[in-house]
Image (tube, grey):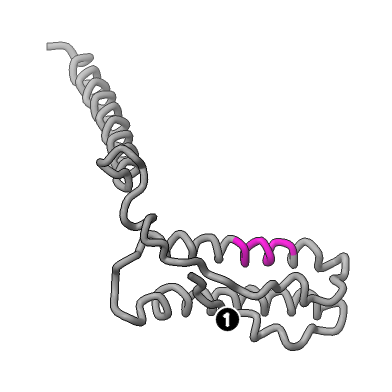
Amino acid sequence: MSRALPKYNKRRVGLAGGAAAVALTGAVIAGTALAGESSHGGGADARTLAGPGTVSCPDVASRLPAVPASAQAEVTRNLQQLDQQIAEANKRLVDTVGQGGPNFVRNAILGPLEDKRAAAIDRIALSIGRTADRPAGLAPLAACTLTK
């Protein structure tokens, strides 16, 4: 036997293993993408027909004082995070219809959302407060409600 044979086998096994990993990853991605699909073909299932409601939060941007130019980018980024947090809470609300007990929405969705919003609002106030007077009275804007 020649010495080239073991290197060839290693290369062949490596290529086969890599191809298998790519195929497995593709199968996992496809399975994950199709996991939420309904078998009825209509695309709507009981979760979307039940209408769990939506998360409603106070508008923070309208309650802010004039934002200094040096803080504008950070304030804008945090305001976008607030919008993204609401969208994620609404998605989670739809995805978890029927789960948990009577306080599930409050404990699993609205409570953590309020904590995240409070942190983002505090970051906004801090960034404005670096160059101007720190805005007061923003803390109550963190609380959100569920509207049907």
Q: Which residue is mark 1?
A: 143
The chief SS type of the magenta part is helix
Apparent side of residue 10 relative to residue 70 in the rendered image (left or right): left
18 in magenta: no
- Note whether 108 is above or below 13 in the view shown: below
Single out the residue that lies furthest toward the top: 1
Question: Where, quadrant-wise, is the N terminus in this rendering?
Answer: top left
Picture mark count: 1
Q: Which residues are magenta?
A: 76-83
Residue 13 lies in quadrant: top left
Instruction: Determine the image quadrant of residue 104.
Output: bottom left
- Judging depth in this view, the residue of 57 and 131 nearest the camera is 57
> Which residue appears at 29% of the width and 44% of the height?
38
Instruction: Tell me: 117 left or right of 72.
Output: left
Residue 147: x and y in percent read 51, 72
Kindly identify the amino acid type of the residue bearing the numbered disc 1. Ala
**Residue at point 40% right, 80% down?**
107
Displayed quadrant of residue 142: bottom right
Q: Nearer the viewer, residue 111 or 148?
A: 148
SS category of the residue bearing label 1: loop
Please name the residue shown 29% across and 26% down the image: 19
Residue 122 against residue 72 in the figure, above or below:
below
Q: Is residue 82 magenta?
A: yes
Percent of width and height locating residue 138: 70, 83
Residue drawn at the location 36% of the way across and 42% of the way down: 43
Residue farthest toward the left in the current orientation of the protein: 1
> Residue 64, position in %: x, y?
79, 76
